[in-house]
Image: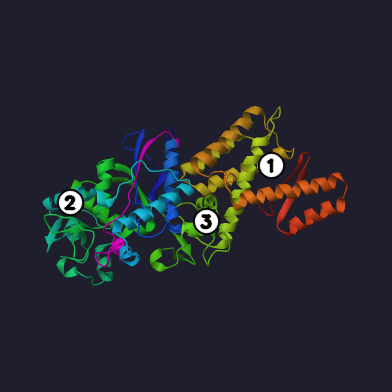
């Protein structure tokens, strides 16, 4: 097992050598979706980011327990202790039971995750399935004096916690800054301080999702579920906690406070946060009304889309950026990703057909080393892809009679692409499905065959016209002794 994997720890704000608590075992907890709407492109980024991490840790030899929660209760409209529960609001608008909403959107989420070829987590707990555990967690906080009950609701005492610990250490915020930006919130008169957050909320009579407790019939606060379920399934201290950067505050900050107060120690060794997907510089989000669902991307049925994009194009698009950098959505960017993925796929198809030579002129060991170095440097997927495209250049050069590979190096190159493209990056061949890429390939084969027939008949004008017309359409033909290959211009 390699031990040189460098991970960026959001808590220390620096890169650190990953040292799991109990090698070769590693615990990974990732905040999953609140299932009140269809899965959009913004949801795809953490799913693919932490799927890449999961795959690479397993490739390095770690036995990973990957826990991804589902929020199905307690996440209020304004990400605070006010407003309507997001799932209840959708249930009211769609005339459904809340758990019917949850199941409908969980089904869509899982289908989209399968389309994106993300591996299933080891455990996928739901907040509503852990009400008793959350109540027990609240009891621990009450016993230790870090929580208080008012009128049937229970709140976390941030000021008391901050006297012993440092509230805001993950996000870098301090209480004075928070106070200056705190709005007057509904129910805030119950709180000792505007910083305090709900652990348990007393439900109004019309509230649909509520459970009995010694404080009131109510429901847990949004932040509580992750502290409770991560400890239940990964232990009081575990290796990696992941999620979107927008969760650093308040969600993960509150989670650190709850867990540290209850356990007397921090639970998480390494915090990892992926950055956002933006549209015109603004975060893509349902609340902002600028989101595109994955189903819309795959079908092309959205006014902002010029065409459909396949699941692997979306996966490739996300992997083109290092997970801590932003990605700005545009049709041009997606088209470029489509062409890039096609170029990679064509390279792999060509690799399958290569014949070995007696000698090698390419150092495959060095290329493999650079691929590992890219991922060992905080999952630098764009650098990895650049090395893989360097490999594609070697493949095309060997195919054209330039570079040479002996049998051993040819096997190493095939292993390299299988390992990094399919096993770790999680990309897959979409040509087996009935999609646009497959249809394009079939049409191009027909056109190339027609051109070859014209050449065989020495109908040079027809042959040249086919080549010229294809070039005008952005497609370049490359003749070789066994026929011709094609690629998009500047691909």
In the visual, does 392 lie left or right of 79?
A: right
Disc on res. 283:
none
Q: State the SS at label 1.
A: helix
Q: Which residue is mark 2?
A: 135
* Image point (29%, 41%), residue name: 234
Q: Which mark is residue 396?
A: 1
Q: Going 49% across and 67% down the picture, which residue do you hit?
A: 280
Label 3 secondary element:
helix
Residue placed most toward the observer, 156 or 114: 114
Mark 1 vs mark 2, foreground winner is 2
Q: Quadrant of residue 76?
A: bottom left
Q: Mark 3 to mark 1: distance in Å? A: 30 Å
The local secondary structure at tag 2 comes to: helix
Q: Residue drawn at (12%, 63%), measured in percent from left and top?
A: 150
Give the residue number, with chain letter if any, for mark 3: 298
Q: What segment carries the magenta color? A: 59-88
As drawn, is 488 to the left or to the right of 48?
right
Residue 371: x %, y % from top left: 54, 40
Mark 1 or mark 2: name the one nearer the start of the chain.
2
């Amino acid at each position: 097992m390699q031990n040189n994997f460098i991970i960026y720890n959001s808590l220390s704000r620096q890169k650190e050598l990953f040292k799991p608590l109990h090698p070769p075992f590693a615990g990974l907890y990732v905040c999953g979706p609140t299932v009140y709407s269809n899965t959009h492109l913004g949801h795809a980024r953490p799913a693919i980011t932490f799927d890449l991490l999961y795959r690479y840790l397993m490739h390095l030899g770690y036995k990973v327990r990957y826990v991804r929660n589902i929020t199905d209760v307690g996440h209020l409209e304004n990400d605070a202790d006010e407003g309507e529960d997001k799932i209840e609001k959708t249930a009211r608008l769609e005339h459904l039971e809340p758990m019917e909403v949850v199941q409908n959107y969980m089904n869509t989420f899982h289908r989209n995750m399968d389309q994106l070829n993300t591996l299933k987590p080891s455990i996928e707990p739901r907040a509503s399935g852990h009400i008793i555990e959350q109540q027990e967690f609240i009891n621990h906080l009450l016993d230790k004096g870090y929580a208080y009950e008012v009128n049937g609701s229970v709140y976390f005492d941030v000021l008391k916690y901050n006297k012993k610990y440092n509230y805001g250490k993950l996000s870098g915020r301090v209480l004075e800054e928070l106070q200056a930006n705190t709005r007057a919130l509904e129910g805030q008169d119950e709180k000792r301080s505007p910083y305090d957050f709900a652990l348990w909320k007393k439900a109004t009579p019309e509230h649909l999702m509520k459970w009995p407790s010694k404080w009131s019939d109510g429901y847990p606060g949004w932040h509580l579920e992750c502290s409770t379920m991560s400890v239940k399934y990964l232990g009081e201290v575990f290796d990696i906690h992941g999620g979107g950067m927008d969760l650093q505050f308040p969600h993960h900050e509150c989670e650190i406070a709850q867990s540290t107060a209850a356990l007397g120690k921090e639970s998480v060794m390494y915090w990892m946060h992926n950055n956002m997907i933006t549209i015109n510089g603004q975060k893509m989000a349902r609340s902002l009304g600028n989101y595109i669902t994955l189903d819309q991307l795959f079908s092309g049925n959205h006014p902002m889309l010029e065409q459909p994009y396949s699941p692997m194009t979306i996966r490739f698009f996300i992997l083109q950026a290092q997970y801590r950098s932003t990605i700005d959505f545009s049709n041009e960017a997606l088209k470029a990703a489509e062409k890039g993925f096609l170029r990679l796929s064509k390279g792999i198809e060509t690799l399958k057909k290569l014949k070995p030579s007696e000698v090698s002129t390419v150092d495959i060991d060095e290329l493999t080393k650079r691929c590992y170095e890219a991922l060992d440097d905080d999952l630098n997927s764009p650098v990895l892809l650049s090395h893989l495209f360097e490999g594609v250049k070697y493949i095309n050069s060997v195919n054209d009679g330039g570079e040479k590979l002996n049998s051993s190096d040819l096997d190493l190159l095939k292993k390299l692409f299988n390992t990094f493209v399919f096993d770790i990056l999680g990309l897959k061949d979409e040509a087996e499905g009935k999609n646009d890429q497959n249809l394009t390939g079939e049409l191009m084969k027909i056109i190339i065959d027609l051109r070859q027939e014209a050449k065989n008949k020495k109908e040079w004008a027809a042959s040249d016209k086919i080549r010229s017309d294809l070039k005008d359409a952005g497609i370049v033909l490359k003749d070789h002794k066994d026929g011709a290959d094609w690629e998009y211009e500047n691909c």
